[in-house]
Each structure stands twice: as structure tokens, then as C-alpha cells.
Amino acid sequence: MMKRWQAVKRLLPLLAVFSLLLAGCGREDLSALRPQGPVAEGQYDLMKLSITIMIVVLIVVFAIAVYVLIKFRRKKGQTDVPEQVEGNFKLEIIWTVIPLILVFILAVPTVQKIFAFGDDHYNEKGSVQVKVTSHQYWWEFEYPQYGVKTAQELVFPTGKNIAFELKTADVLHSFWVPSLSGKMDTNPDGTINRFSFSTDKEGVYRGKCAELCGPSHGLMEFKVKAVNPDSFDKWVAAMKAPAVLPKDQALAETFKKSCLSCHAVGDQGGPVAPNLTGIGSRESVAGILLNEGQDGGKPVKENLKTWLEDPQAVKPGNKMPAPKDLGLTDEQIDGIADYLANYKLNY
Ligand code: CUA
């Protein structure tokens, strides 16, 4: 017993350091237990309610069990069988009615919230519409009201209802930003799902694919970034500005020929692969390689080079061919990484 306590004592400072580390994160992690918007808060309230009920039931049941064990234990010298009681109408009513009341207390807010959070606000006035398309292994975000498309990083204004319409380009994925709301599937059968969330807190929230979809499922991350409405308008304007291409003419040609057949920047390029407009100011490269300014983050250019040198090493099974296989030289790859790293949006 003494030894165990010593071990616990030795672990305490470690625990303290861990809590400090966790509390120190300015960016919201994958946790539904630190809700940052009304939808997530409502869901967190349901968790708290059900856990509270369960704890109360647990305490009462254990207290009665312990009381009975002590009170009715065999006494010294007792040899006779105690009185055997069979059936007690009053008790049976009590232990049927109490659970029914508890289930009712749990059911009413749960059903209310499930329907409220499932409401379709897509065509409501004031909603910011976002069409989400999942791909193996990246996320496409289209803003039909603004004529803007982006990938991997969803930028949206605080204080507004963000109404999503979700579909997939290939297999089943699930859109999940734990600190803002629950999950929503993107169905391969062509059906479209809608839901919405909002937040008043500016910040970067981590999102994740929550449905096994292939070898890089665990790497199918994205970020959602809540900014104030002015910044959002600036972001939209910057997204709609004409494409910025590499200054070096030869490099610009290479970039157009090799990259813009699938990717897009500004008004140029294709819709097949992630839109790269302003990729230099995103939080991550490919959704998973964290950029500078975050825990363990690296300079954008370094991340871009890691990706461009071997996309399959970063996200196995993704559909991007290695630039080397397209005939690009190391120098050209470095030039493109440099150009993309400096392609930043002011907002
Ligand atoms: Cu997409 Cu898992």
C-alpha cells in the first residue's frame, strides 16, 4: 500500500505538467468535452445530464447494497434462516416508477435536441451556405453564395449560422469538428445531408474524418477557422482576386502544365484536386502537416516540400502523382514550394 502511494506521488508532477500542456493549447483539439459553440454545448449538456443521472443511480444503489450487507449480515451465534420475504408491492412500484421518471428526464431533452440540431437551416436568411464534398483523403468547401471554393481549411464568420450540405465524391466519409458539433456522414448513395453549427469564438478548430475510408482515413484532417465577419469578407475578396502565378515565366508554365490540370488557384485551373488559393496562409499542408505557429509546426515551405517530394509517404493511397514522376526537377519542385508558401491571403 505504502509503495503504491509512493508511485502515485511520483506521477503527480507529471500529471500536473500534462494538464498545463493541455490547458496551454490556443487551438481547439479533437474534444467534444470543451464545446466552443451552441450545438456542441447542447450536446455536452446531454452528456452531463446522462452522466449525472447515472452517478446518482450508482451512488444510491451502492449505498443501499452496502447498508443491506452490513445491517443484515449473519450475527454471531446465528444459526436459523432469517425470514424469507417474497414480493413487495410497494417496493416493486418504487423501483419501476423511479427508472421510468429518470428515462423520461433523459428522453425529453435528448429528443428535443436531436430534432433541433437536425433541422435544415440551409435556405434560411442569414445562413452562410457551405457545400462540403469529401474525397479520399481531403475536404472540398464551396460557398455558393460567394462563388468561392477552397479545400482543407474552412473559413467562416463568427456569430453566423453555418449551414452545411454534405456529399461525397467517392466512398463514405464523416465530417466531424468535435468542439463545434457531432458527426455528419457523407453518403456514397448520392443522398445529401444537411446540418449547421456556429460559434461566437474566433479560433481554429480541428476537424477529422470519422468514418473508415481507406489507408489514410486517420490522416484525413481539416481545419475550421472562425474569423470576425470583416475578416471573412476580406477573405472572400482575396479568394476571388485573380490568380497569382509564379513570377518566373518558365516556372509559371511548368506550374500551369503540371499542377493546374487538376488543382486550381484563383480563377485558373481545374476542380479535380484541392484548391490551392492562398495555401501559404493555411494552418496546415494537406490538412495534416502542421505549419509554423502550432505545437510541432514546421515552416510552410518545408511542409510543402515534404508533400511534393513524396505525397504517398504523407498520405498513402491518395490520388496525387509524385511531381518527380511528372518529370519535374528538384529545382522546379523547390521553386513551386517556394511560390506556394508565399501565396498568402490577407484577411
Ligand atoms: Cu475519409 Cu475516413
Image: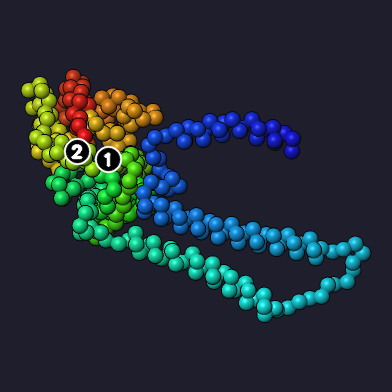
Vertical position of residue 243 compared to residue 163: above or below: above
Q: Is residue 179 left or right of residue 76?
A: left
The colouring scheme, among rainbow, by chain, secondary structure or one colour, is: rainbow
Q: CA distance from mark 1 to mark 2?
A: 9 Å
Q: Is residue 13 above or below residue 95?
A: above
Tell me the residue that label 1 is attached to: 227
Residue at mark 2: C-beta within 8 A of ligand 1: no
Question: Residue 344 shows which numbered tag?
Answer: none
Q: Is residue 97 left or right of residue 68?
A: left
Q: Is mark 1 within 8 Å of ligand 1?
A: no
First in sequence: mark 1 or mark 2?
Answer: 1
Quadrant in which the N terminus appears: top right
Q: Which residue is mark 2?
A: 235
Taking the image as shown, residue 166 lies to the left or right of residue 268, namely right
Which residue extends farthest right? Answer: 77
In terms of image quadrants, where is residue 246?
top left
Contact flag, marks 1 and 2 (Cβ < 8 Å): yes
